[in-house]
Image (cartoon, helix red, strand yellow):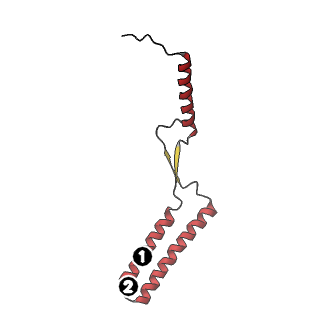
Amino acid sequence: MKMADVPAPELNNKLKAALYQQEAVLRKQPAMHKLSLWYLPMVLNLITFSLLALFALIMIENIYLSCFAAGICVYAGVAGILLTIVGIKRANIKEDIIIRIEKRGVLA
């Protein structure tokens, strides 16, 4: 079997131009996806102290003591939120707490 048809130079040039254009689009896309984790300690702290407050309200029979313990837990949760926000702003480490995930199939 032989193939005698050769594509026209114009068609060949159009295909090359389309290929180069697709490569240019792929090169403009960022090669990494960034996932910021600065809020993770704050969320874990809030969840932990919320569960402790709920546990205190359920398990402690004395209503005043249970409310006092739950109040301390809520205060600790709110303080954790404020400390995280102030620490991030003050230390300027928001860019350091990022996971960078490489995208597959993207030209570097």
- Image location of residue 76, percent across then percent down: 51, 75
Q: Nearer the viewer, residue 53 or 26?
A: 26
Q: Is residue 68 above or below residue 13?
A: below
Q: Nearer the viewer, residue 104 or 9?
A: 9
What SS does tag 1 mark? helix
- Image location of residue 97, percent across then percent down: 54, 56
- Image location of residue 72, percent across then percent down: 49, 80
Three-letter amino acid code at the position of disc 2: Ile
Q: In terms of image quadrants, where is residue 49?
A: bottom left
Three-letter amino acid code at the position of disc 1: Leu
What SS does tag 2 mark? loop
**Residue ID for mark 2:** 60
Q: Residue at x 62, y 61 (%)?
A: 91
Around disc 1, counting alpha carbons within 10 Å, would you say few (fewer than 14), some (14 to 19), or many (20 or more)? some
Q: Is residue 34 above or below residue 62?
A: above
Q: Nearer the viewer, residue 28 or 101?
A: 28
Instruction: Locate the N terminus and report the quarter of the image it occupies.
Output: top left
Q: Residue at x 41, y 73 (%)?
A: 51
- Image location of residue 62, percent across then percent down: 39, 89
Q: Is residue 36 above or below residue 42?
A: above
Number of the label disc, if any, that sits on residue 52: 1
Estimate the spatial distance between the alpha carbons at disc 1 and disc 2, rounded to whole Å: 11 Å
Q: Residue at x 51, y 66 (%)?
A: 42
Q: Residue at x 54, y 36 (%)?
A: 26
